[in-house]
Image (cartoon, helix red, strand yellow):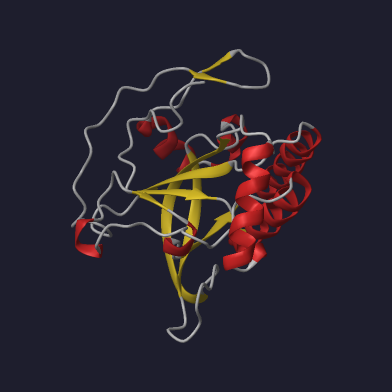
Amino acid sequence: MGNLFCSEYTIHRRFDLKGSSLGRITDKPEAEIDATTILKDLDLNFLFRLQRTWFQDFRRQIDRDCEFLEQERIMDYSLLVGLHFRDSTTFQNLSPSDPQTPTDHVDPNTKSSVPRLSSAEVDQLLLDPKGWASIRLGVNMPARVERTERKNDTEFQLVGEPTGEYYDVVMFFGIIDILQDYDISKKLEHAYKSIQYDPTSISAVDPRQYSRRFRDFIFKIFEEDT
């Protein structure tokens, strides 16, 4: 599988999202969070808004992938999301990562090479929506994000409240970590943690429950842009 974030764009924010809350927060102090930090569900402070056609394609693809993973008894997978903020001043305090030369991305469904668009090509597409059909789902996708805020008195609130503050971004995303089946170790982990914590908050759950919770969460944070 190719590097999801291999692009000319600097990835300013990286999120590993499962839809669970127990332990799903970075252990870094806020002052140490930079462009290389992998943030988690309870760190998420954005809603992702996709153009209508892409959003519909995204929903269909997530449904297909989750149904397949559930049938294979796979759980504990994540949606990895990378954001490049098109306004360079938005996160100018972030430590910039070194720009990388675009390489071909291997489509996991066809195993064929999918050429990535350069940043200049994506910039041109943004000015000409007629060419948006050439952009592949999850790779160099123009989108908008809306900042969210969590209520201080709400513990483990997965999705914050929208603020109306929008940013233009280029998005990268894909499901990762798809090899963990619900084996005896995960069943024991579920039984042990369920005694101490809310069973719905832990990552180790039955594949059917995992798939349903994952989709419910993803479809709350991804919306059609209007």
Q: Does any portion of residue 156 appear in the rendered image? A: yes
State left or right for residue 34 relative to residue 26. Answer: left
State left or right for residue 191 relative to residue 1. Answer: right
Q: Is residue 183 above or below residue 163?
A: above
Q: Does any portion of residue 226 appear in the rendered image? A: no
Q: Position of residue 94 (x, y in %)?
A: 21, 53
**Residue toward you, 23 or 214:** 23
**Residue toward you, 98 or 31:** 31
Task: Return the residue found at the far bottom.
Answer: 153
Q: Quadrant of the C terminus?
A: bottom right
| Quadrant of residue 26 within the rendered picture | bottom left
State left or right for residue 149 relative to residue 48. Answer: left
Q: Residue at x 46, y 87 (%)?
A: 153
Q: Position of residue 75 (x, y in %)?
A: 66, 41
Q: Is residue 82 above or below residue 26?
A: above
Q: Position of residue 138 (x, y in %)?
A: 55, 37
Q: Residue at x 71, y 42 (%)?
A: 57
Q: Residue at x 51, y 34 (%)?
A: 139
**Residue toward you, 212 or 140:** 212
